[in-house]
Image (cartoon, grey):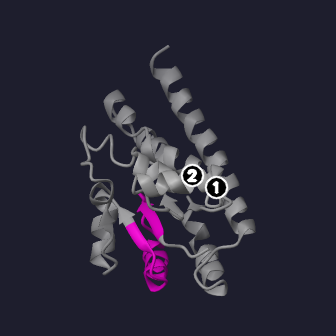
Amino acid sequence: MKMKRAVVSVSNKSGLSELALCLKEYGVEILSTGGTKKYLDGIGVNPVEVSAYTGFPEIMDGRVKTLHPKVHGGILNIRDNTEHQKAMESLNIKHIDMIVVNLYPFKEVISKGCTFEEAIENIDIGGPSMIRAAAKNFKYVTVVVDPDDYSKVIENMKANNGETIEDLRFYLAKKVFYLTSDYDKNIYSYLSRVKE
């Protein structure tokens, strides 16, 4: 299964250039937003703005960017389900085969001291939604949330003609659910302290 399309949206850009250039080398179209798009433009990767792909602009100060059926349908469709593929075709949804996302740095922001409003704005919504969707559909989608895994993904792609193997995708999917459970635990803990 050839990897055609990836969403890349990260707050932590360490190690990203090597992964992004690898994706470009294998002809993977990259969708991105905001600061990540600017960074990728700067290294010559030139991703497609997510809003150009969805046909719907970012709204509400960036609170709504990737929460769109063209994104989530592209991630969640079962590739060998005929009905899913008919829906994809009729709605002009394209497969999204990789998600590379770091969540908003909620824990780091509150640890430095911030206003309640700043803390709330650093609760990521679109990121967890995408990575959970990709982890659920790990049979078909590679999800990368930890820069330490970029080299594993690159090596796997190079060894498999631009594809990843299911064992790696399952390993990466499990990391997602650990991350999101810890992320939500930190939000709950913070909200419990400030609004008892």
Residue that numbered label 1 is attached to: 81
Disc 1 element? loop
Residue sitting at the far top: 196
The circle on residue 89 is: none
Q: Is residue 170 left or right of residue 56?
A: right
Residue 102 seen anywhere in this rendered image of the structure: no
Which region is colored magenta? 5-30
With 100 as the anchor, is 39 left or right in this view? left
The 10 Å Cα crowd at callout 2, few under 14, some 14 to 19, many 20 or more, is: some
Tell me which corner region of the image, top left, top right, bottom left or bottom right, holds residue 120.
top left
Nearer-the-camera pick, 88 or 59: 88
Name the residue at 48% across, 49% down: 72
Image coords of residue 74 (percent x, y): 49, 56
| Amino acid at dot 1 | Asn
Residue occupying image coordinates x 39% and y 34%: 119
Q: Position of residue 114 (x, y in %)?
A: 35, 35
Quarter assignment of residue 159: bottom right
| Other-residue count near label 1 (Cα within 10 Å), few / some / many at <14 / 14–19 / ≥20 | few
- Classify mark 2: helix, strand or loop: helix
For the point 59% across and 68% down, the residue is: 148
Is the residue 195 above or below the residue 132 in the image?
above
Residue at 38% in and 49% down: 66
**Residue 84, which numbered label?**
2
- What's the amino acid at mark 2? His
Verify CB contact (< 8 Å) between mark 1 and mark 2: yes
